[in-house]
Image: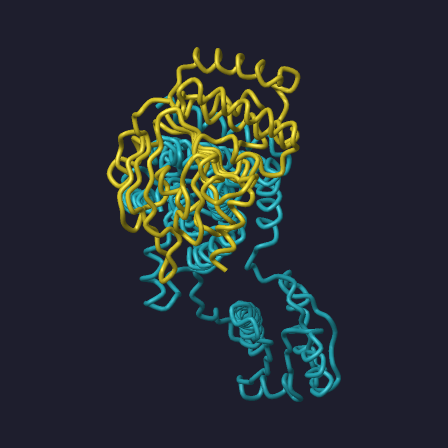
Chain colours: A cyan, B yellow
Amino acid sequence: MKTILYIIQKEFKQIFRNKGMLPIIFVMPIMQLIILSNAATFEVNHIKFGYIDQDHSSTSRALIETFNASSYFNVIRHYPSENLASSAILRGDIDVLLNIPLYFERDLQKDQYNTLGITINAIDGAAAGVENVYVTQLIQRFNTRLKVELTQTSDQFVQPEIIETIPLFWYNETLNYKTYMVPGILVLLVTMITLFLSGMNIVREKEIGTLEQINVTPIKKNQFIIGKLFPFWVIGMGLLTVGLVLARLIFNIPFLGSLPLLYLYTSIYILVVLGMGLFISNFTDTQQQAMFISWFFVVIFILMSGLFTPIDSMPKWAQHLTEFNPVKYFVEVIRMVMLKGSGFSDILPNLLKTTLYALIMNGLAVWSYKKTN
Amino acid sequence: MSNENVIQVERLTKTFGNFTAVNAISFEVKKGEIFGFLGANGAGKTTAMKMLIGISKPTSGEATIAGFDVYKHAEDIKKNIGYMSQKFALYDDLTVKENIAFFGGIYGLSRKIIKEKSKHLIEELGLVDVANKLVGALPLGWKQKLSFSVSLLHNPKIVFLDEPTGGVDPITRRQFWEMIYKAANQGTTVFVTTHYMDEAEYCDRVSIMVNGKIEALDTPKKLKAQFKVEHMNDVFLKLARHTE
């Protein structure tokens, strides 16, 4: 026990003495949290919208006015011909093009039916889908209004049959994207920083030769490992704390669940990451190698964590793969606890899986750490 | 020097794939002896030494260090030896005092003993003024002396020194060897590798390793007589050239 304290003391001294280290540990993640949370949004806004109005009727003008009034669309301008409009899409001036055909109003009144041409730049398929929904909604609304007008002009006062749905958005009533993203990004930061720091730390001692000196001492390997990793465990918990405070102060993210519960889960989660860092450092000889391998895993973990893209929409095989992703469990837990107020029994499955993961990962790490080659 | 053998090595071998780095070397070292372990670069000195200090598993052969078997009791060996590697292996970003306290702590010395030893050691090495300075800022010679002292903190039976005076000025080398003598007089066995042949003359006995084998082993005086030369340098050259 005393030996462990000596190592912990030494590690803290080295970390806080290193002028470059503190900014990496605290300033960088804070900046990332602030920048990423504000920037990483999938809300589709300010859609660049253009139109061709061949009809020049009051109905076509009213339709365009609908788009003008919508906050989702920035009406760029109208194009006199399809050629000009398509080259505007090519240049990236507009992403959505509405084509109102000639005799739109006349045919609509005559046949009670007509078609409109919508062209959407679908390089970003997800965005195109959302844009399509917006456009359809706007046109539908316009359509019902038109129907009412048409029926009224024929002197029969008939209410059109409309089923209106009133959605209730639970847990995030205002559909604020940041409420969803900030907790997830916090997970990302805690994971990255603790993984990189722990992975590189032991390799660094390999590089400068002090690890050999340690291996010649009678120190037990679990003493050394605990002493080495504990400071980074503390840093990870500290990062979570800083992040939660910022989430509250800057982003006003609600915290419905139990704070101790989140800390309990995080304390175990960080063990998984530290075990992984140590495992990586056991199989690498330079900080560079450790960095590359850590990055490899971090990128996979993040993209397959449900942080940016929902796991439910991944192919089946990928969904099975995410079972091995610790980041996925943490993202789920932090969103559940913070935003839904989930309790102990709700997160128990994730807690158990993470604990098992921690045991396996650290078992492997201790086993693969060899004082003798 | 007593007759007790603290290092006993029998046909110790280490191979890496097809390459035999250490080829069946046998020797013994007595308690309190200064044993010079010589050889050209790549002769296998460091590999042999790593097996003796328990951080590299031998491929075959036997070795007993301070009464413990290298295969079965590597961790017991580590309690009884000190080691100073080729690379400077104290922490550059810790102060002189902190380095002493850390390594003392790792070897399980009590805080009281660490404090006493630290004070004594710092005075003896003349590091009082820089005791709270980072080790990284010290000149190489001072670092090496400090490193040697740290390896002796836990009063090991044997201390292994891997080229301890490489790149150090002649005066400091002199002082370093005085420290080695002092340790040997107090009963510590010193196992030292070096490339300086004048240092070889200071050893009680010297072994010369060539291509993984020990080609000569005796007191410097007898070796010189055996090869009919004036200096250890010529003994070394004769042996090394012999192989080419």
Q: Could you tell me if residue B139 is visible in this image?
A: yes
Q: Position of residue B230 (x, y in %)?
A: 56, 39
Q: Is residue B9 above or below residue B244?
A: above
**Number of numbered callouts drawn:** 0
Q: Nearer the viewer, residue B128 or B58?
A: B58
Q: Quadrant of residue A333?
A: top left
Q: Nearer the viewer, residue A234 or A162?
A: A234
Q: Is residue B146 above or below residue A128?
A: above
Q: Position of residue B150 (x, y in %)?
A: 49, 25
Q: Position of residue A59 (x, y in %)?
A: 65, 77
Q: Quadrant of the N terminus of chain A?
A: top left
Q: Residue at x 58, y 13 (%)?
A: B123
Q: Is residue B206 above or below residue A298?
A: above
Q: Residue at x 60, y 27 (%)?
A: B174
Q: Nearer the viewer, residue B33 or A125?
A: B33
Q: Is residue B129 left or right of residue B100?
A: right
Q: Is residue A282 left or right of residue B87?
A: left
Q: Residue at x 44, y 11 (%)?
A: B112
Q: Is residue B172 left or right of residue B73?
A: right
Q: Residue furthest left?
A: B72
Q: Residue at x 60, y 80 (%)?
A: A119
Q: Nearer the viewer, residue A228 or A235?
A: A228
Q: Quadrant of residue B29?
A: top left
Q: Could you tell me if residue A252 is visible in this image?
A: no
Q: Position of residue A308 (x, y in %)?
A: 48, 57
